[in-house]
Image (tube, coloured by chain):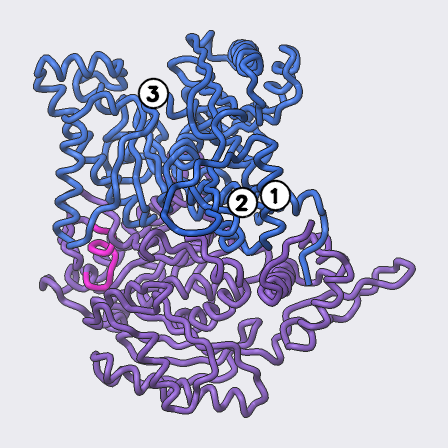
Chain colours: A blue, B purple
Amino acid sequence: MTISGDQSLLREINRMAIVRAVQQGAGLSRADLAKATGLTKSTVGLLVQDLIDSGWLCESDVQATGAIGRRPIPLGLDGRRLAMIGADVSLEGLSVLAVSLTGEVLEAASEPLPGRRPEDVLPRLAVLVADVVAKARSAGRWLLGVGVGVPGAVLDHQGTVKLAPNLGWRDYSFHAVFSAELAACGVADLPILVQNDYDVAVLGEYEFGEAPLPDPLIYLGLGVGVGAGVVVRGRLFLGADGFAGEVGHSILQVEGPVCSCGRRGCAEAFIGQRAVSTRISGRADDLLPVETIRQLLDRNDESAHLSVRRAGHYLGVLIQNLWTSFNPGRVVIGGPLCDLGPPLFDAAFSCLEGFSRDCSLPLPELRLARFGSRSIGMGAAALVKHVLTRPMDYRLCDR
Amino acid sequence: MTISGDQSLLREINRMAIVRAVQQGAGLSRADLAKATGLTKSTVGLLVQDLIDSGWLCESDVQATGAIGRRPIPLGLDGRRLAMIGADVSLEGLSVLAVSLTGEVLEAASEPLPGRRPEDVLPRLAVLVADVVAKARSAGRWLLGVGVGVPGAVLDHQGTVKLAPNLGWRDYSFHAVFSAELAACGVADLPILVQNDYDVAVLGEYEFGEAPLPDPLIYLGLGVGVGAGVVVRGRLFLGADGFAGEVGHSILQVEGPVCSCGRRGCAEAFIGQRAVSTRISGRADDLLPVETIRQLLDRNDESAHLSVRRAGHYLGVLIQNLWTSFNPGRVVIGGPLCDLGPPLFDAAFSCLEGFSRDCSLPLPELRLARFGSRSIGMGAAALVKHVLTRPMDYRLCDR
């Protein structure tokens, strides 16, 4: 009895099962992979050779162990041939990267946002992407696809931006329009994937992280918006409508301050850039640049210190609530507000340590975002790798 | 190219893929199943016959459609032959059910808790389970296994109760001891599975629910403890250490009342039975029976109404936070406090409607627990079905 059916899909499922196994345990040999995947040694041998030929895997040097006999050859992801394009559409500007399978940045281009209307943004983004595509190709890279991270809610299977409040976009057919713009720039042969910015950021941490990969993994993004991307059982967790992880709008205080979403007491209304700005300036709905807030902190401005420490305390509460809800293996903190440094984080850690002491439980691992201000661009590239290496999940979707 | 390897495991994976497909879409024909699973029609034909022979599936009557030619035979889960045993260990007592594949209760037995020490509890539980096993077998049922729900954190792969605070158990090898006790009662041939009470309760809702099954699905349990079980992408969500869904200990108010866990302002400290009792009686740490609180409500006791409405309001906040974190397809509310009825739920719904209005987003579907006070026993039986129908997930575990 064997699984039969669509043979090319099955072959792809098996190929990608091997890639994922190598990613989870770099240095595995062909024999290890047969054990890890349940495939026969001969099948693994054929697929590994194919994966080496097509740029996914490479053989590493055999380690001298002193043992007698032919030593198994360790396999790893090959960072030298394949690449993904990752694009970050944000209020700060457009940024496009070409990234290797192992997470090295190969090419980069960026420019300020040419306006907020999609008809201003998408043609410029297409030019920027086409430019990076051309450079990566002339450097000999084989490209797998283009990922885009946008600051809003995205319907996964359509590539439609449901709502991007800070850009003012609603029900916008991003995938369809961007595909046409990119084709007009001479790039018509690459798959295009669109997803929420924090959702792609967590994939950057996951796909380019070192094994063993923590699971669940949460990326908590701190900026004007506060939100999270979550990986559960090795796959991006989207929820029923694609809005899972909108934890910036979980309530931390009944009848607290009004939030941009209309509710009161949301995490974002305590932690977000607008909340910190308003506290410092005393003007409702003020939005100071992060750099300005940092300068005030450097000058020991008391109001800035109080405001940032207050945000940090609520950041601790939010992380504690993520901890009890998701039981994450790791929480990664990213976004522009990370530039505020110790005044923010010391308050958050001290709050979290208090909770941990009160309930006598160890905290989950906390980390700063691996790629800093490039988290979303790296994540958008990682989205391509994530989807291609899970052909079963994304073609025979279980919802 | 085909997947090869452990042939009996692969056969089981394919068999159970068919069972899950039938569960997701009752009335599917063999041809529909071939499309849904990617297996060939001949493989599906052989496996369906085997599943019919072994009691998993049955053929339903063909609907007259007026179409010409041989009509496809609709398939469904067979409720007449297989059964699972579900045991609920709680402060209120021991309760054991035999449940059919389609969720009918076939046998039931219960008795008060014979003490709180495990050496008092487990021998009695084994006698009760052996009794229900004997009755179900003499009624002609083929049994698949025994599931147990316990009020505490359980390490999934070991069946160890890490911590059950209200029973006072810590690091107790439940699975090993209970297997021995059950064997001493003459039942040594059934798989035994142990899991947290709210985690099994969500499986009762999922496994015995009608298709299409909502996903993510959350069961929010309200009693002395407050917590949730969560299904994500068709599978119980446990988190890194098995504690995901401990949302009773998410903070709803910084510096709020002290919780049983030692932290301040946890959801449980606003919503749990102890919080309501303390508010009514004015005595710290009081615990009134739910029935007493209900009688006070019936007598229009003002303090009881205020206390329960306050708990209801925070219940609304907690559900709103589950909504933004998990984006659930459905939230099910269960547990003893549900007996408090409208004073609790009206306050919760009114709070939730306020949030929904503020942010102009529709609420997730809300339901009362399908099986009421039997939610945990039904869930424990469902745990057996859940694990057996996911042989890949639970044998080749991805964490």
| Residue contact at pointers 1 and 2, CB within 8 angstroms | yes
Q: Chain of mark 3?
A: A
Label 2 residue SS:
helix
Residue placed under numbered mark 2 in the picture: A18
Label 1 residue SS:
helix
Q: Nearer the viewer, mark 3 or mark 1?
A: 1
Residue type at mark 2 is Ile
Residue placed under numbered mark 3 in the picture: A373
Q: Nearer the viewer, residue A57 or B23?
A: A57
Residue type at mark 1 is Leu
Report the residue at 24% width, 79% height from top: B118
Crowding at dot 2, Cα within 10 Å, few <14 / some 14-19 / many 20+, comes out as many
| Residue contact at pointers 2 and 3, CB within 8 angstroms | no
Measure the alpha-carbon separation of dots 1 and 2. Answer: 8 Å
Q: Is residue A250 magenta?
A: no
Please indicate whether residue A223 sits to the left or right of residue A44 in the image: left
Measure the alpha-carbon separation of dots 2 and 3. Answer: 32 Å
